[in-house]
Amino acid sequence: MKRAATPKDAESMGMIRLLGIVVIMVSLGGSAAFALDPMGPPLARVGKGQFSIGADFSLSKMDFELSSGKWVTSGPGFDPPTGDPGGRTIKDFETIKLYGSVGYGLTKNWEAFVRIGAAKAEFGDSIWGADGEDFDSNIDFAIGGGVRATFFEIPELNLQIGGLFQANWSNFDGKLDAPIWPAPDFVEISLAEAQIAIGATYTWTNRVQVYGGPFVYYIRGDLEDIFTDFEYSWDIDEGPIFGGYLGARLQVAQDFIFNIEYQYSADATAIGAGLVLLY
């Protein structure tokens, strides 16, 4: 027999919609956002031997520093053939990521997961400061994974305390061009990111949970820029960056879960969302 909706369920659905609107508005009006992957509730979502499949989506923007620069040329007439181009700042590095994910319950309270998907990025007016400078990458490969754990529960408060570690790697390659340039540069960016979080999940109703807590974030990588006989390269090294996150988890149907969240630090904001089927 289908369960009838209760006033508290209706209130919970209203809360989910409101949280989604707030997350989107704050993200659009906030500071630069790091390309943080969605975390979801800090707890194991499946029991021992159980699986989950799902999809995760992120739309984000970030600024990062390029350091330890070096240029090399194979062209004639340059002495010395190498040098230091100085540091740079990539501004408004916009990324779109879409993952398919699989999770597995290692024990009652520990879950491992992997994500495989695609990513696309763009930025402008950053490396060389030319008017109309624009980088638009191809659709490239991205992969990630991690573990979630439930540490303990406080039944009288409807709380579960847990944590999460996740990491991802993505690669972006494409042309960097400007109207005044005779030919475009070829740019390749490789990024590895890691995120560690702890937090609490509060069961609002039997269909709705809210969650949040602190996290720390790191990013490492490199950028290469090739133009005719010149090759430029820089390192990317950011973190630790500390922040906090808040989200909501809705049971849409039996074993079908949707979550949306907001992540914030002094330097960044991000939104994330996911769909999960448990079985």
Image (spheres, helix red, strand yellow):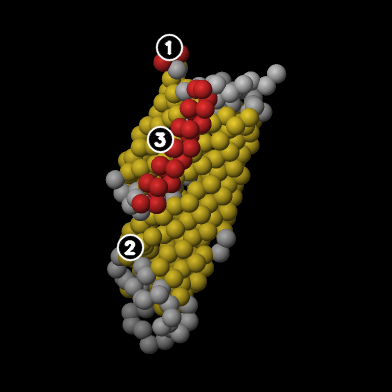
90 up-or-down from 12: above or below: below
Residue at horizontal 53%, vertical 47%?
Answer: 57
Q: Nearer the viewer, residue 236 or 172?
A: 172
Name the quadrant containing residue 254.
top right
Amino acid type, label 1: Glu
Q: The C terminus appears in which quarter of the rendering?
A: top right
Depth check: give the residue in front, 164 or 14.
14
Foreground of the two, 52 or 113: 52
Residue of label 3: 246
Name the residue tied to disc 1: 156
Q: Residues within 10 Å of mark 3 (few under 14, many from 20)?
A: many
Inspect the image, locate mark 2, and give the three-letter code of the amino acid beneath it: Thr
Which residue is depicted at the point 32% across and 71% down? 85
Kindly indicate whether the residue at mark 3 contacts the one at mark 1 (C-beta within 8 angstroms).
Answer: no
Placement of 276 over or under 56, stated as above or below? above
Q: Which residue is mark 2?
A: 89
For the point 48% across and 37% down, which residue is it? 17
Q: Which mark is residue 12?
A: none
Mark 1 Cα shell of 10 Å, populated few (<14), some (14-19), many (≥20): few
Instruction: Name which quarter of the figure residue 253 lies in.
Output: top right
Q: Are marks 2 and 3 in contact (CB under 8 Å)?
A: no
